[in-house]
Image (spheres, coloured by chain):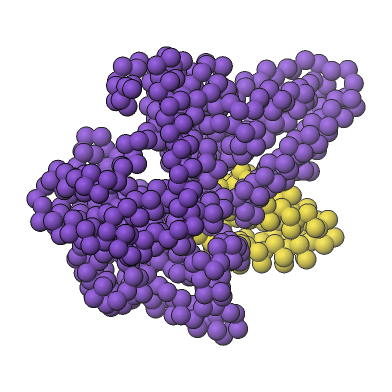
Amino acid sequence: MIEKTVKIVNKAGLHTRPAATIVKLAAKYKSEFFIYRDGMSINGKSIIGVMTLAAEIGSELKLTFDGPDEEKACIEIVAYFERGFDEL
Amino acid sequence: MKSFTNIYKNSENKITGIAAAPGIVIGKAYLFTKEKLNISKAPITNSEEAISNFEEALKQSKKELNKIFGIAREKMDEVRSAIFEAQLMILDDPILLGNIEKRIKDEMVQPEFIVSDEISKYQELMIISHESYMKERAQDIEDIKYRIIRNLQKKRWQSKIEKNLIVVSESLTPADTLLFSRRESLGFVTDHGGLTSHAAIISRSLNIPAVVGTHNASALIKDGDTIIVDGFHGYIITNPTEVQVNFFTEKQKKLIEIQKGLEEFKDQPAVTLDGKEINLEANVDVTGEIDIVITSSAKGIGLYRSEQILNELGTFPDEDEQTVIYSKLASRIYPKFVTIRAFDIGGDKFRFSEYKEPNPFLGLRGVRFLLENESLFRTQIRAVLRASENKNIRFMIPMISTLDEVWRSQKIIQECKSELKKEKLKFDNHIKIGIMVEVPSAAVMAKEYSEEIDFISIGTNDLIQYLMAVDRGNDLVSDLYQEFSPVVIRTIDHIVKAAKHSKIPVSICGEMAADTLAIPLLVGLGLDSLSMSPVTILYAKRIIREFKFKDAKALANECLKCKTEIEIQKKVKKFFDDNNISRTRNIL
């Protein structure tokens, strides 16, 4: 299992569109993907779950990846966070 | 015939709201209530059958949403309609669906109860959030929840709606409004919402009369009541008397005649009797309005309020998405031009600003906000530049109040241009950059500004508010909002002279440009262009073709000497009478 902490860097935060993209990216991989925030764990393959996360600029989220393709999944999804959801 | 005021004064069956889309319509009301669904927790005996019912309901919901998504894309353009995409994805959410199916098997109760219970859990998480947009998001989820449950119960609200009704509702979601427009609804009346609500924007762009923000229309109007919607004044008459029906039927007829009469001006220029041509341009809020602009004989788009994209999307689109929006706009209007105004937003409108400004009108708005959020500004500038390849885009900066803001904006634009050159992306290197003059400090310094920029557009709504220090939304003082105040007329004159001195074009894009009474005076003051809602362009054209520029100039000179608004109004009205121009507004 891989664990990573990411920071929200785009102005608008984790709004609906990046939420949808994250879920789409996660769906490509077999590995389990979870997002942790304020003691909650959200399955990253669930759009309705990710939509409950109010993550504004500057907030930090813990991500975990677990499965056969966890490294690839981690690289792609973390990069998407780091690019500020392509909104920078 | 009874006069307008008498008809309203004597009517106790009048409901007042905000005039959101012009037009008059008489018809039967359809009271659209978000039905309170009765959710059954009854036990079931066959879980397989229940799950297959659930899957069927999902399929039907997807079908409905896809249809809405399709209409949205057709009427609103791809990026904006993406708002519906997340809703569609929820119908495929493996975790949510897995949990629901598991619970149906384990608990052996009606799937509608499980669906409601499961989705409500997520909604509660959103509602307890401090962020206000999360509450809206919970509302979106409510939409999906009800859709699935309704389909489980095999109810379809669409089938109940007959065509040609006036829709009355507490509020309307974008999906509702689009679907109703497809059912040939005659008009919209809502309790909530303002001029920029979805119902208002969509009805304007589709030419369907609408009155919004009535507070209680949906409680006062009953299903099947005959009602009259006056989208010019923001009134609704319920169960009208014969006199009222006759009055409005007459008005409707006149309106149709006027519109027919206006058609003949469509292909003629907006030129005064002595040959001065005025550019009539369109203000555009939504992409749907572009069709009207194209057929309206407008010279171009004098004001494209780009912040509307944000209102509809609820987020900031990235550079590529914005490029697509602007390119589409520019190529549809080509060879006419479009003036894109940079996002005119205040920090209070968007969630990343946690600071509540005590006085947002005097706060971080327009260019101040953009310079404060530079990466966002750059994203928009780059997108606008990338869309400017055909050289028919102009870019305009709102709320300028110091020269420094002009210089800083220009520097950023220059830097974006250099980047694009390096990236070998095509754009119009000579794109015209203009400013909105809507703050008194900019009006005073108009001459200095004119030397730095390519064009000026006067935003009269804000300019008047700031000049008179009056909030026109505040009933206690709104009578001080005076379009014809000598202060306003002299300030416009000052700006126009400054622009002429530097030989740059100057236009007006505030509501004053669409006030048919103001047109001769504005033309007389020397404005080259007037930008207004596309539906009012032909009215303006008709007036311009009925007087001489020479006389309008004399009118302006006289008005510049006046001391009070009343004096100016008298002169303007006399001008209409002397030149035998009928005042279109009064006919309406």
On screen, residue B300 above or below B137: below
Q: Nearer the viewer, residue B237 or B4?
A: B4
**Residue B267 at x, y = what percent?**
49, 57
Q: Is residue B8 left or right of residue B329?
A: left
Q: Nearer the viewer, residue A12 or B446?
A: B446
Q: Quadrant of the N terminus of chain B?
A: top left
**Residue B563 at x, y = what percent?**
9, 50
**Residue B422 at x, y = what percent?**
56, 85
Q: Quadrant of the C terminus of chain B?
A: top left
Query: In this view of the protein, can residue B80 be seen by the observer?
Result: yes
Furthest residue in direction bottom, as rendered: B422
Q: Which chain is purple?
A: B
On screen, residue B386 above or below B40: below
Asked which quadrant contains residue A39, the reply is top right
Colour used to depict chain A in the structure image: yellow
Tell me the residue at 52%/16% (across/down).
B225
Asked which quadrant contains residue B403, the reply is bottom left
Query: In this view of the protein, can residue A58 be seen by the observer?
Result: no
Tell me the residue at 31%/42% (across/down).
B582
Q: Nearer the viewer, residue B214 or B502?
A: B502
On screen, residue B440 above or below B100: below
Q: Nearer the viewer, residue B299 or B256?
A: B256
**Residue B298 at x, y = what percent?**
46, 58
On screen, residue B12 above or below B319: above
Q: Is residue B36 left or right of residue B221?
A: right
